[in-house]
Amino acid sequence: MKTFNEKIYEKLKLVPRGKVISYKELAKSVDSKAYRAVGTAMMNNKNAPIIPCHRVIKSNGEIGGFCGEVKGKKILEKIKLLESEGVEVVNGKIDRKYFYSFSS
DNA sequence: CCGTTGACTCTTT
DNA sequence: AAAAGAGCCAACG
């Protein structure tokens, strides 16, 4: 039995470049509503290189607090640059059309 | 086993 | 529109 975070990682890895997904949708993809646990899994994520955490965002289209307004940290622009490769980031937010869905 | 915590989300004010 | 409160699940001590 894989742990919750493992399942989340698998799903997240399936998200194509230029697309993003919200915590809720990600949790739902694993048949759970643990959107909180999803975020915790990302924080704990030991598979950092294989997990595009920056591709996971909030449902309202904003980036997660992990790079939103971290004083002293400049990762904010780094994330925006990564998303700019395929996702149009407007005012620090992402359009719904860039949201990836597992329901095909 | 229970209480606290967290990269969240939804509803109401 | 912005802010606050309640609800949600999993991991840790």
Image (spheres, coloured by chain):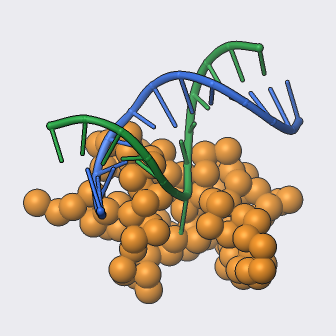
Chain colours: A orange, B green, C blue
* Residue A26 image position (x, y, % from top left): 43, 52
- The mark tally for this picture is 0
**Can I make out residue A33 in this image?**
yes
Q: Quadrant of residue C9?
A: top left
Q: Quadrant of residue A69?
A: bottom right
Q: Nearer the viewer, residue A98 or A83?
A: A83
Q: Residue furthest bottom?
A: A49
Instruction: Name the quadrant containing residue A12.
Output: bottom left
Relative image position of residue A83 (x, y in whole percent): 68, 72
Left or right: A31 as drawn, with respect to B9 = left
Residue at 78 percent of width and 80 percent of height = A72
Asked if residue A94 lies left or right of residue A28, the reply is right
Q: Where does the image place residue A86, in percent across and percent down from the top left?
A: 67, 72
* Position above or below: A77 against B3: below
Q: Is residue A11 above or below residue A35?
A: below
Residue at the (39%, 74%) spot, across then down:
A45
Query: Residue A99 location in percent, x, y?
Result: 59, 53
Pick whichever, A97 or A35, lies toward us.
Answer: A35
Of all residues shown, which one is farthest toward the left? A1
Q: Residue at x 68, y 69 (%)?
A: A67
Image quadrant where one finds the N terminus of chain A: bottom left
When the figure is inspected, residue A32 is found, relative to residue A2, above or below; the finding is above
Q: Is residue A80 visible?
A: no
- Residue A68 is left or right of residue B2, and the answer is right
